[in-house]
Image (cartoon, rainbow, N blue to C red):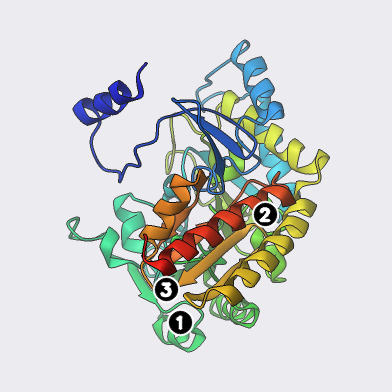
């Protein structure tokens, strides 16, 4: 189909709730995607980290093909072997607990909200979250999200959420009351501008939650599945949450999400209290198990450390050449380049030069390449960024 007709179909029939880039993608492999005209792009932001082990990873595509020929869907009133196996694999890498499967990060966070409220009910039903956080687009998730722009037009917001500044322990301590059931945060704020939690802050938060008998919820929707060099980001900080939410890279491109809860609180969600039609289906579980297999057998967490170190080295060299760069921050293969100006022009120049990245918070360029990325691909991406920043300096963007 002609790419113009594809775009026209969207214009005529798809609800326009996304800012669209006029790019029609037809196929992908590893760190690359190709558009309808056959042009190749280096993808350093594959689906908001969904394709975390690369586009169309062979282990994932083969697992999905095999499973699709056997059984596609099973009601959660019945058992199938892959859901139990996947839950066991997640727990093996996390902490002693149980797993609820769903389809998206927002759904996983909704499950966390419900579990926390049920656990604290009726006297404790408030959840403290962080400013600049992002937890999804459902009504409760935008109330938890500490960014007004996602809430405007959807009032009244779901009550029971209070936001405080990120990395400010004193502010958090003041916000905790006898009604507080949980504290929720991202160890690295993605949409908030790739802002990393201080290790001392997370240690203090964990201690506060323990002392006050409050649940600690970590949203690892974007930072999980090996991106920071550990299977889950919290392991870099020497703490352990009570609840953790996963999505994005969990299925290697296939939609699946999960709430992980410590064993002593997991059964609060008893039969009838929560459910989902498609969560934990055979296809999704096959894809997620193949994703774990790829991460292990191909040593992708080690690559996240090595390639991530190289990426930050190259980005900091770029910072020394371009004073417009205020900061370079992140961990592993999750990087943010904060500019002193609006980043839209740089993003668009990178697109012209066949590099896909993201710009969040107006001035933070976000790079989250797949865990299979190689140094030569990092070199190419940084070269394009260098050229785009040069064009910004010369006033041509």
Disc 3 to disc 1, C-alpha distance: 11 Å
Does 13 sit above or below residue 245?
A: above
The answer to whether residue 18 shows anywhere in this view is yes
Q: Name the residue under label 3.
A: 180
Q: Which residue is rendered at x = 39% and y = 35% of the image?
A: 23
* Residue 91, image x, y percentages: 70, 48
Name the element at disc 2. helix
Q: Quadrant of residue 263?
A: bottom right
Count up the numbered dots: 3
Of pointers 3 and 1, the one earlier in the residue sequence: 1
Of pointers 1 and 2, the one earlier in the residue sequence: 1
Mark toward the viewer: 3 or 1: 1
The crowding category of the residue bearing disc 1, from other C-alpha atoms within 10 Å (few below 14, some 14 to 19, many at least 20), is many
Of pointers 2 and 3, the one earlier in the residue sequence: 3
Q: Name the residue under label 2.
A: 379
Q: Name the residue under label 1.
A: 172
Q: Which residue is rendered at x = 79% and y = 53% of the image?
A: 302
Q: Which residue is rendered at x = 73% and y = 47% of the image?
A: 374
């Amino acid at each position: 189909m002609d790419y113009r007709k594809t775009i026209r179909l969207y214009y005529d029939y798809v609800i326009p709730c996304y800012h669209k880039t006029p790019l029609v993608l037809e196929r992908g492999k590893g760190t690359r995607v190709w558009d309808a005209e056959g042009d190749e792009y280096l993808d350093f932001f594959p689906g908001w980290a969904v394709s975390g082990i690369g586009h169309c990873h062979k282990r994932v595509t083969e697992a999905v093909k095999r499973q699709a020929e056997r059984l596609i869907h099973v009601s959660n009133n019945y058992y199938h072997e892959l859901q139990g196996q996947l839950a066991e694999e997640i727990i093996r890498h996390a902490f002693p607990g149980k797993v609820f499967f769903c389809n998206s990060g927002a759904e996983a966070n909704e499950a966390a909200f419900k579990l926390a409220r049920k656990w604290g009910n009726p006297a404790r039903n408030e959840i403290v979250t962080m400013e600049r956080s992002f937890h999804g687009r459902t009504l409760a998730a935008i109330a938890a999200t500490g960014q007004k722009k996602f809430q405007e037009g959807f009032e009244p917001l779901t009550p029971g959420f209070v936001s405080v500044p990120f990395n400010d322990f004193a502010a958090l301590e003041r916000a905790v009351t006898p009604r507080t059931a949980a504290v929720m945060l991202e160890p690295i704020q993605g949409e908030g501008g790739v802002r990393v939690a201080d290790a001392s802050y997370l240690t203090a938060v964990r201690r506060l939650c323990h002392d006050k008998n409050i649940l600690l919820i970590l949203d690892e929707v974007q930072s999980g599945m090996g991106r920071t060099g550990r299977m889950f980001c919290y392991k870099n900080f020497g703490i352990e949450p009570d609840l953790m939410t996963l999505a994005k890279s969990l299925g290697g491109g296939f939609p699946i999400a999960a709430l992980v809860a410590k064993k002593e609180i997991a059964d609060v969600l008893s039969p009838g209290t929560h459910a989902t039609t498609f969560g934990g289906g055979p296809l999704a579980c096959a894809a997620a198990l193949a994703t774990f297999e790829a991460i292990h057998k191909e040593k992708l967490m080690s690559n996240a450390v090595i390639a991530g170190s190289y990426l930050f080295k190259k980005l900091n060299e770029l910072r020394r050449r371009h004073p417009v760069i205020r900061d370079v921050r992140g961990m592993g293969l999750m990087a943010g380049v904060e500019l002193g100006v609006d980043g839209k022009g740089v993003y668009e120049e990178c697109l012209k030069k066949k590099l896909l990245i993201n710009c969040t918070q107006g001035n933070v360029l976000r790079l989250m390449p797949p865990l299979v990325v190689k140094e030569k691909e990092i070199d190419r991406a940084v070269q394009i960024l260098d050229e785009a920043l040069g064009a910004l300096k010369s006033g041509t963007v």
